[in-house]
Image (cartoon, helix red, strand yellow):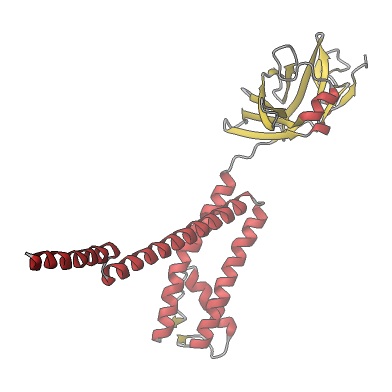
Amino acid sequence: MNHRQAGASLSRPGTTAVAGARSEGPPSRRHAGSQSRAAARRAARASSLDRQVEAAIREGYELLVSAPMLAVLGVIATMFLAINLVFAELYLHLGGISGVRPGSFTDAFFFSVQTLSTIGYGITHPVSLPANLVVTVQAMLGPILTVFATGVVFTHATRVRPLVEFAPVAVVTEIEGQPTLVVRVRGGSRSSLPGAWVRLTIVRTELDPGGLAVGRMRDLSPVLEPLPLVSLGLTVMHTIDASSPLHGLGPEGLRAGTAGLMVNLVALDRTGQVVQAVHHYSQEQILFGRRFVSSLAEFRDGQLRFDASRFLELEPEAAA
């Protein structure tokens, strides 16, 4: 009886030791777990690097597409010349090109140009294995460069650019007895603005119920005054009445907590394409006591016509 109890008492520590070993796991499992965690970290770093490279390529592409056309053509020409210079050095070092004079960088360069552009006159051609391998790599780069250049030039040429000119300032003037925020905008290069949609947003610093200063964006209801006959411009007005976020704010009150005025314009150009333009007015560019000059002028024949030269001009509010 005592022997059984002793055996049972001896078996308990063994059982505890086995349970403890199981909780820690055998060495092979711990090693496999550390390897899987290391592999997961390497995969995460590789994924992060891929995202960074992709973001850099996209940013460079957007920068190239938005650059002037001469700059785009210059970048493409520089890439073309750089690739040919590198491969010309390889051909000159490796040799094995029939029809290329030994030591002639000019012959090697023009052979590289023919290979990259897939011209292939047949006078010069590779005859050695190393030269054929280099030609194979360059032959794969040729279509890639062509597709890249074609895509950039086509995107640049067909990209819609808003030819829109905003007045350099916005004004707060009295119209029909009410203070009114006025913004003027017109199409540039004889572009018309039919069916324009405009959004006015004031950015102000306000105090929340807890007394914390927060930036808020308040939409202002705009009223458009287009020029239907010539469609060269429009006047955007916002009446500062009791429902306006600007109600009761004078020049000092408006400038004290206002970060700026955002004007978002969506319209059609003469080709029927949708164009969008965004303009920002700072505090200093919102003027009081000034108004825009009437763009309608009476000519010698007695008819009222649109005078584009006066569309963005200002005059004192008290002027007759």
Q: Residue at x 51, y 82 (%)?
A: 90
Q: Is residue 293 left or right of residue 89?
A: right
Furthest toward the bottom, the residue is 102
Q: How many marks?
A: 0
Q: Is residue 166 left or right of residue 83?
A: right
Q: Residue at x 9, y 66 (%)?
A: 2
Residue 252, image quadrant: top right
Q: Residue at x 87, y 25 (%)?
A: 314
State the image coordinates of residue 242 (x, y, percent, origin top left): 73, 11
Q: Quadrant of the N terminus?
A: bottom left
Residue in front for this viewpoint, 184 or 102: 184
Q: Quadrant of the C terminus?
A: top right
Vertical relation: 129 (above or below) 253 = below
Residue 318, image quadrant: top right
Furthest toward the right, the residue is 319
Q: Is residue 91 left or right of residue 168?
A: left
Can residue 192 be seen in this snapshot?
Answer: no
